[in-house]
Image (cartoon, rainbow, N blue to C red):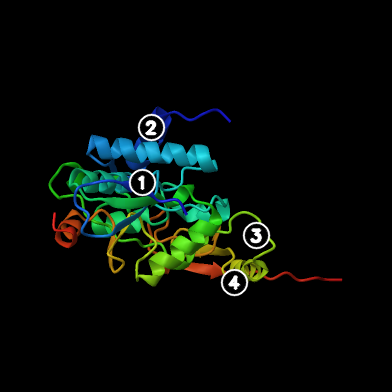
Amino acid sequence: MQFSKVTGEKKHHKVVLYALSTCVWCKMTKQYLKDSGIEYDYIDVDLCNDEDKQKIRQEIQSKGGSLSYPTTIVDDKVVITGFRKDKLKEVLEI
Amino acid sequence: MTPITIEQVRKRAEADAQTFGYYLTPDPDLLQGLLDGLKVNEERYGYPSCPCRLASGNFDYDRDIICPCDYRDPDVAEFGACYCRLYVNKDIYEGKTPLPTVPERRPVEKQSRAFGPAAPPSEAKPAAAAEEKDEHIQIGPKLWYCKQCGYVVFREEPPYICPICKAKREMFAEIKTRTDFLG
């Protein structure tokens, strides 16, 4: 599974973003994290092969997330569904 | 297939909004992003599935999320906007109400089908293939009719709102069909 890394000066949280390449709210989340200087990894699920999609589904559901995009998982435990600036701000201390 | 232009995607959405009394999202950047996503999906799958949902590429599995999706009418009625927020009501369009967050109404079983295998399964997954086949039979399409206007539809579940007379889902009943073999 090929995640893309976006570098940033704030690295104290592990941030993983599951996104869709076609989704405008996912793009806004990527941009917001980038502009806030947060380092994160993301993957565009719609561009993955079936095997990877299955793994991603298991991963998101095992963390208690729903299968909506964008899904941001912080430090392997906090799941944020949708582009929720308020929640991202709070969890990532932006 | 003739390539679709962004203008065609926009015109189609505008016409649909007008027909149903909705508006397109007032934020120009958001609107552009949504139309771009619809265009990509139409080119990729052959139909404009929701840009904010994962499509399977299998038309039968994605039928409910082809824009305008099955969930638009109940979402606009309840939240003022559809899931991706392409379609909004008048108050949001005029800026009287802020753009809401709209939770996903699509059942998780339907979402799960997009996570493969959409293509013919490989020999390594015979069990998964059998499972998928069973699931398909269980939730196969049925005939439903609107008790208010008589509209008939062939799909897994009745629509949330009748597209003809706007009756609610409760007004739909299944048409039981029987095939007799007379000799």
Q: Is residue A38 above or below residue B144?
A: above
Label 2 vs label 1, nearer the camera: 1
Q: Chain of mark 3?
A: B
Instruction: Tell me the crowding category of disc 2: few under 14, some 14 to 19, or many 20 or more residues within 10 angstroms, Cα based.
Output: few
The residue at which mark 3 appears reads as B121
Q: Are marks 2 and 3 in contact (CB under 8 Å)?
A: no
| Mark 3 on the same chain as mark 4 | yes
From the top left corner, tell me how far across and down residue A93 is, in percent.
Answer: 14, 58
Q: Are marks 2 and 1 in contact (CB under 8 Å)?
A: no
Is B130 left or right of B2, judged from the image as shown? right
The residue at which mark 1 appears reads as A23
Residue located at (40% from left, 71% from top): A62
Picture quarter containing residue B27?
top left
The type of residue carrying mark 1 is Cys
The type of residue carrying mark 3 is Pro
Label 2 vs label 3, nearer the camera: 3
State the CA–CA distance, disc 3 to disc 4: 20 Å
The label number, if any, that marks residue B11 in the structure image: 2
Residue located at (34% from left, 61% from top): B104
State the CA–CA distance, disc 2 to disc 1: 20 Å
State the CA–CA distance, disc 2 to disc 3: 38 Å
State the CA–CA distance, disc 4 to disc 1: 31 Å
Residue located at (51% from left, 37% from top): B43
The type of residue carrying mark 4 is Gln
Instruction: Tell me the crowding category of disc 3: few under 14, some 14 to 19, or many 20 or more residues within 10 angstroms, Cα based.
Output: some
Residue located at (23% from left, 45% from top): A34
| Mark 2 on the same chain as mark 1 | no
Is B93 left or right of B69, judged from the image as shown? left
Callout 2: SS:
helix
The type of residue carrying mark 2 is Lys
Q: Are marks 4 and 1 in contact (CB under 8 Å)?
A: no
The residue at which mark 4 appears reads as B138
